[in-house]
Amino acid sequence: MKIELSSFTEKITKLDKDFEPEAIGLEEEGFVNQINLEAHVIKEETNRIWLEGQVNAHINSNCDRCLEPFVEDVSQKIRLLFDPKEKDNKQEEDTFIVTSDTLDLAKFLKDSLLLAIPSKHLCDPKCKGLCPQCGVNLNEQSCECEIESIDPRLEKLKEIKSKMED
């Protein structure tokens, strides 16, 4: 995804672009539909360019509790600073040097979206998951399994209690 820096003649320009996951190399990561970038391009008098906004996408996931497939929303705020200084000049932290009029945002957007993918995928925060004994999806039906959850660290206390009761 490339943008021409010379096309931004005003101090603040709204940027709203939709593009395919293939455009930034995310075709194998499970991203579906179009990715949307909503941002403001702010051009300073020193020709430094700020890109501030949000990138939104959808990804195919499987719930970590019930294993059902679902489409998950992924969004990430972005704030990038591009400076047209020469490469030899000292660069500020988190500033990217621009050497041409064309700016390729693909790497920045790809990295932002990959970092925004949650480590735990849940179809619903209230997902009940699967029964550990029979494997039935507890969101769709209930089962008759008796699940006794005892902390294994307290198992010895249960044995002592049963001996005391005898």
Image: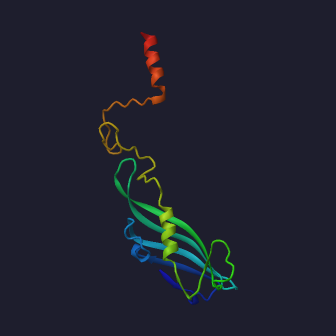
Q: Position of residue 37 (x, y in %)?
A: 50, 74
Is 113 in front, or is 93?
93
Front position in the image: 17 or 59: 59
List x then y, in percent, for residue 32. Answer: 38, 68
The colour scheme of the drawn protein is: rainbow
Which of the 4 image quarters holds residue 78? bottom right
Quadrant of image for the C terminus:
top left
Disc tally is 0
- Residue at horizontal 43%, vertical 15%? 162
* Depicted 6 relative to depicted 39: above or below: below
Say if 135 sits above or below 90 in the image.
Answer: above
| In the image, farthest residue toward the front | 88
User: Residue visible at 45% across and 29% down?
Assistant: 152
Side (left or right) of 127 relative to 93: left
Camera-side residue: 62 or 127? 62
Residue at the farthest top position: 166
The image shows residue 1 at horizontal and vertical percentages of 47, 80
Seen at 42% across and 77% down, the residue is: 23
Indicate whether 33 appears above or below 43.
Answer: above
Please tell me which residue is depicted at 58% across the width and 90% down the height of the picture: 6
Residue 98 in which image quadrant: bottom right
- Tell me: 99 left or right of 69: right
